[in-house]
Structure formats: structure tokens, C-alpha cells
Image (cartoon, rainbow, N blue to C red):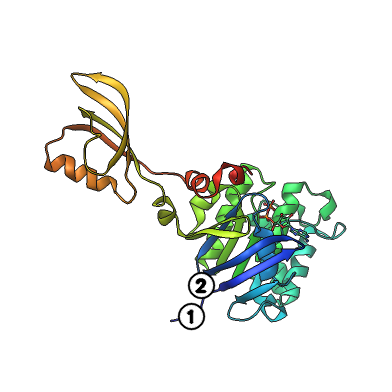
């Protein structure tokens, strides 16, 4: 079934006085994908997501959310975890989730049943009746996550969802994102922690100073950086085609030596391996060291921006 993107921004800019917080930003999130919105502090992530949610309006450009302009009509299909968490302090955890479910058009019974199921999944069953002000920060954040997913939204938008959660709860959140995705939801989450994106995203966008630096899959992001290899070989491989540089490592005896090789842009590890095999270059070890998303981020946006 052909369908348009779940979310599309076209030449969107948002200025605050002289500052272009979001600068001519275009990207599209396909229906059903998990999309990482990555950037350092102040890159423009929250501003972008707020425009998608119609909390603020773009200075210029256009946005399409589930095929419509941002606005109230979309609300029942959306789930949103804002960066600034905040819920009614004197409402119980279960009532809070039920309330949000009802706001999204659920019946009181369905909202409550789903609320109880979520509290159970999040390890908060014993706190269903506790008021929000009695919960720890992490617990309150899980309740807030529950309010975002209670209606099984078609498009789930999470702004820095991992911040403030301990490793166990970060894992629980990752599971919840995978669960929503498996049920067919489109998930967009912002983060400056690359490891989460590395584990979860189908595609991602790198944002710096309000501008898009990259949009694509994790593999495409990694391909931006020259591949690096660790090999144990006899002789110097520096003269082989496709090798950009060689760093000599530990001597292993009888002429064998560890070497760290950087390949020229566009050259794949397999190309070099093929050449070695075809030309009788003896190898004892041949390991590709794929760049991490963090490496890509540093390469694309620089250490200044990456320091989050
Ligand atoms: N209402 C506002 N008025 C003036 N400037 C703003 C406003 N909102 C955001 N900005 C500025 O726009 C830029 C982008 O901010 P934004 O919150 O979108 O970044 P972010 O990528 O979400 O960063 P963080 O990870 O730190 O939350 C920042 O320089 C910020 O100071």
C-alpha cells in the first residue's frame, strides 16, 4: 500500500530574534520507521519537534504530520513525551494515564485498562494510587511515557526520552519503543546519546546549528567515514591500492606485524581483502573496525557541537 511519509518538513526555519534555531530544514520520516533526531545541545531538536506538535509555528516552510498540517486534528493519533516533564502533582499515577487516554478519545474503561497494563509493564503496579508528587523522578518519567503511549499512537514523538533514566529504565524505554514500532507506530525520538540511536533507529538525522548535516540509515552514516582495519600481515601494505595510510603496530615475529590501515574514501574492506587474496599477500588477521555513530557525529559536526 503506497502511503505518504508520517512526517515531512520542507524548508522549515524558525528564528528567535537574530538566531536561526532551525535553518532551512527538510526531512521525511516514513510510516512505521524508528527515526533518530540527533544533535548536541542547542542544535534545534526541541524547537523542531515543537513545530511538529503545533506548540510553536515555523517562521517559514511547511510541515506535514500524518498527511495534514500540524494541529488539533492530528492529536488523537499522536503521542508526545516533552523534554520538560511535568504532570499534575496531586493526581494519582493511574488517573494521570487514564486522563491522557481520555483526552486522546479513549473510553474511560479502555484508558484505565491500558493504564494498569502500562504501570505493570513499567514496574509501577504498586504505585497506581500514589500521587505524582510522591514518585521519584524516574518513576514520574515512566508515568509520563505511559501518557504518551496509552492511546497506541500512530506517531510517537519523544524529546530526549532517555535523559534522567537509570540504565535499567533506559532499557525499559528501548523495549517500549521497539514494542510501539512492532505494533506499527512511527517513532521519532531526539537524543544526544548516540548509543541509543545506534541500537534503535532505522534511519536518523544529524542536526547541528539548526541545519541538517546528514539523513539516512546507520550504515549510510558509517559509510561517510573511511573504513579502518586491523590486520596482521607480512611486509608493508601501504603500497596496495585503496590504502590511504598504515600505522605499524606490534611485531609478531618472523616478519608478521599488526597494522592499522585506513582505506581511501569509498574503498571497502572487501576490496582490499580480494586484492590480498588474488595477489598472494599473506594475512593472519583481517578485521574491519566500523566507525561508531559517535565517530560519525564527531566527523560530521565537530567536537565542539558533539560535546553534549
Ligand atoms: N523561545 C525561545 N526564545 C529564544 N531562543 C530560543 C527559544 N527556544 C529555543 N531557543 C534557542 O534556539 C536554539 C535551539 O534550541 P533547542 O531547544 O531547539 O535545541 P535542542 O537541540 O533541543 O537542545 P537541547 O539538547 O539542549 O535541549 C538554542 O540556541 C536556544 O537557545
Q: Residue at x 34, y 48 (%)?
A: 265
Q: How crowded is mark 2: few (under 14 residues within 10 Å), some or many (20 or more)?
A: some
Residue 31's label in the rendered image is 2
- Image position, residue 216 (x, y; %): 46, 61
Q: Is mark 1 on a helix, strand or loop?
A: loop
- Image position, residue 170 (x, y; %): 61, 48
Q: What element carries label 2?
A: loop
- Image position, residue 200 (x, y; %): 51, 55
- Against 22, residue 259 (above or below) is above
Give the residue at the far front of this rendering.
18
Rendering quadrant holding ligand 1: bottom right
Q: How crowded is mark 1: few (under 14 residues within 10 Å), some or many (20 or more)?
A: few
Residue 120 is drawn in which quadrant?
A: bottom right
- Against 287, residue 174 (above or below) is below
Q: Distance between the residues labelled 1 and 2?
A: 8 Å
Point out the image quarter for the C terminus.
top right
Q: Residue at x 41, y 56 (%)?
A: 220
Mark 1 vs 2: CB contact within 8 A: yes
Q: Residue at x 65, y 72 (%)?
A: 78
Amino acid at each position: 500500500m503506497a502511503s505518504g511519509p508520517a512526517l515531512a518538513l520542507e524548508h522549515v526555519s524558525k528564528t528567535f530574534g537574530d538566531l536561526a534555531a532551525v535553518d532551512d530544514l527538510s526531512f521525511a520520516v516514513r510510516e512505521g520507521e524508528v527515526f533518530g533526531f540527533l544533535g548536541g545541545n542547542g542544535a534545534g531538536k526541541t524547537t523542531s519537534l515543537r513545530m511538529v506538535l503545533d506548540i510553536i509555528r515555523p517562521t517559514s516552510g511547511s510541515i506535514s504530520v500524518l498527511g495534514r498540517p500540524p494541529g488539533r486534528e492530528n492529536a488523537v493519533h499522536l503521542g508526545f513525551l516533552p523534554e520538560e516533564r511535568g504532570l499534575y502533582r496531586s493526581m494519582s499515577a493511574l488517573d494521570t494515564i487514564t486522563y491522557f487516554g481520555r483526552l486522546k478519545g479513549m473510553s474511560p474503561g479502555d484508558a484505565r485498562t491500558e493504564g494498569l497494563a502500562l504501570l505493570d509493564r513499567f514496574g509501577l503496579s504498586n504505585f497506581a494510587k500514589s500521587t505524582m508528587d510522591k514518585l521519584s523522578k524516574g518513576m514520574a518519567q515512566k508515568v509520563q511515557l505511559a501518557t504518551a503511549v496509552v492511546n497506541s499512537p500512530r506517531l510517537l514523538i519523544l524529546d530526549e526520552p532517555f535523559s534522567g533514566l537509570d540504565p535499567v529504565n533506559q532499557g525499559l524505554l528501548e523495549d517500549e519503543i521497539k514494542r510501539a514500532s512492532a505494533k506499527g507506530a512511527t517513532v521519532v525520538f531526539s537524543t544526544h546519546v548516540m548509543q541509543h540511536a545506534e541500537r534503535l533507529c532505522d534511519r536518523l538525522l544529524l542536526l547541528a546549528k539548526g541545519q541538517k548535516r546528514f539523513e539516512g540509515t546507520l550504515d549510510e552514516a558509517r559509510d561517510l567515514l573511511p573504513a579502518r582495519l586491523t590486520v596482521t600481515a607480512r611486509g608493508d601494505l601501504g603500497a596496495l591500492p585503496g590504502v590511504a595510510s598504515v600505522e605499524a603496530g606490534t611485531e609478531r615475529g618472523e616478519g608478521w606485524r599488526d597494522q592499522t590501515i585506513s582505506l581511501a574514501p569509498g574503498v571497502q574492506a572487501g576490496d582490499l581483502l580480494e586484492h590480498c587474496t588474488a595477489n598472494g599477500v599473506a594475512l593472519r588477521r583481517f578485521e574491519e573496525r566500523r566507525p561508531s555513530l559517535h565517530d560519525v557525529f564527531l566527523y560530521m559536526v565537530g567536537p565542539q557541537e558533539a560535546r553534549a
